[in-house]
Amino acid sequence: MPPMDGEYDDLHRRAEAGDPAAMNELGVLFSGAGRQAEAEEWYRRAADAGNPVAMDNLGVKLAEAGRVHEAEQWWRRAAAAGDAGAMNNLGILFKRQRRNVDAEEWYRRAAGAGEVNALYNLGLLCKEVGRVKEAELLWRRAAETGHAEALAQLSELSEQDADLSGLRERAEAGEVGAMTDLGIVLTEADRLEEAEHWLVRGVNGGDADAPFNLGVLYARTGRTDQALEWLVRSAEGGNPHACNGVGRIQAEIGETASAVDWFRAAADGGDTAAMDNLAALLDEQGPGAESRELRQRADHVRRAHNNASLMEHMGRTAEAEELHRRDARRGDSDAMCMLGRLLKRIGRPEDAERWLRRAAFTGSVGAANELALTLKQTGRLDEAEEWYRRALSSQDVDVMYNLAILLQTKGRREEAERWYRRAAEGGHDDAMYNLANLLEKMGRSQEAESCYQRLAEAGDRDAMGRLSQLLDGQGRAAEAQHWLRLAQG
C-alpha cells in the first residue's frame, strides 16, 4: 500500500515519467511514512538525475544509516550545484569530526547562500572557541528571520550578563577571588577572551586557584604550551587536579610515559578523573589488574566524597552548593559533577550543564555520562552521542547501555544492538531486556526469546510477562501460561 494514495499516485506517475522533483518528493513521502529503503531508492534516482535537493536528502539518509563517507560525497555534489542545505550539512559533518576550520568554511558558504541554520551553527562554533561577540552578531542575523534557537541563544547571553553583574562589580572593585570566579564562569560560558582577562588578573593578584583555571582555559583553546606552563605551576603549588590536566595534555600529544607519571601523581593526590584516565591508558596495553584496581579506588573515593551530599540530603542546599563550588574551583572533577547534578535538581539547567561539561573535559566518566544524558534530554542527540563515545574508554556498562538507547532513538538499530549486547555481557539486565525488545521488533523472535528467558529464569517478572506474550503469539499456549503465572506471582 502506498503511504498516501492520492498524492502518491500523482507523484508516482510524474516520477516514472522522469521528473526528478517528483522523485525527490516521493522520497520525502516514503521517508515520512517510515519506509526508509524506498525513500533512499527514490532520493537516489532523483540525485542521479541531477536534482541537488535530492542529493542533500540522500546524504541525510545515508548519514542516518552510518554511511558517512557516501553521505559526504553526495553533499559535496549538491553543494557544487549550489544547494545551501548541503553546505550546512557538510559544516555539521566536519564539526562532528572536530575539523573546525573546514566546518567554519562550509557554514560561511551556506550562510552566504541564504541558509539561516548555517548562521546559527556558525554562531555556536564561534561561541565554542571564545568568539562570543561574533557569535552574537551571527545569532542576531538569524533571529531577524525568526530563528527560534538563535533567539534563545541571545536571551541566554542577556541573562548571563544580568547574572554576572554582581560578580563583575566585586572583581572590578579589586576582589581577587571574584576575579578568578568571574573568569571560571566566563570560561564555562565560552566567553573566553573575557575569561582570560579576569583569570590573568586573578593570577597577578595572587589567587591560589587562578593558575589552574588559566591553564584549563588555554587547554580549551588549544594553546598547549601556555596550558602546560600554568598547569605545571599549579601542580608545583600542590594541586593534584592540575597534575591530571598535565597528564591529559601529555596523552593527547603522544607523550604516554609522561602522561602516566602525571596521572599517577594526580591519582596519589586523590583525583578520581586521573584514576579513570590512567586506567584507560593502561587498558590500551591490554586490560589488567591495575586498571581494575584504579577504577575500584575511584569508586571508593567518590563514595567517601559525601559531606556536601549529606548537607544536600538534609535540605541545606546552599551550603552544599558552596562546598561543591569550593572544591570545583580547584579542579576537583567529582565536586564539579556533583555541583552540576545539584544545580540540575534545583532548576538551574544552564549552570548545571556548564559544570558537567567542565568535569567531563577532565576525563571524568561519570560527568561525561551525565552530560550526555542532559544533552539527550534537551534534544542534542549528536553531541550526546559524542560524549557517550568519549566515556566508552571506561568500559562502563551504564555508558554502553545509554549509548545503545540513544542509537536506537536515532534509528541505528544495528549499532544499538551491538552496544546492548556489550552491556548485557557485562551484567546489565536492563540492557538485556532492551536487547530482547529490539530483537523482537526486528523480527528475530528466537533470539529475543533466548534473552527474555535468561532474564525470566533469573527472576525478572517483566521479562516473564514479555516472554509469555511472545510465546502466546507463536501458539505455544502452555509455555505462555507457565510464564504468565510466574510473572503474576
Image (spheres, grey):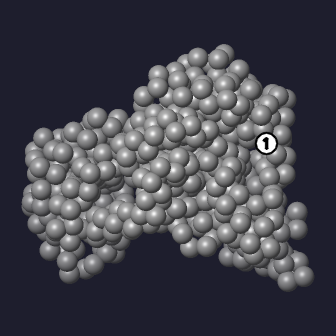
Closest to the observer: 147 or 62? 147
Q: Amino acid at mark 1?
A: Ala
Report the residue at 83% width, 41% height from top: 296
Report the residue at 62% width, 31% height from top: 234
Residue labelled with disc 1: 298
Image quadrant where one finds the N terminus: bottom left
396 vs 84, left or right, is right
Report the residue at 21% width, 62% height from top: 140
Report the residue at 84% width, 35% height from top: 293
Is residue 85 at all visible to an observer of this figure?
A: yes
x and y percent of residue 431 in the render? 70, 58
x and y percent of residue 18 in the render? 10, 57
Closest to the observer: 368 or 164? 164
x and y percent of residue 385 in the render? 51, 51
Image quadrant where one finds the C terminus: bottom right
Residue at the limit of the structure toward the front, as seen here: 173
How many numbered discs sit on the rendered protein? 1
Q: Residues within 10 Å of mark 1 (few under 14, many from 20)?
A: many
Closest to the observer: 280 or 318? 318
x and y percent of residue 50 in the render? 11, 48
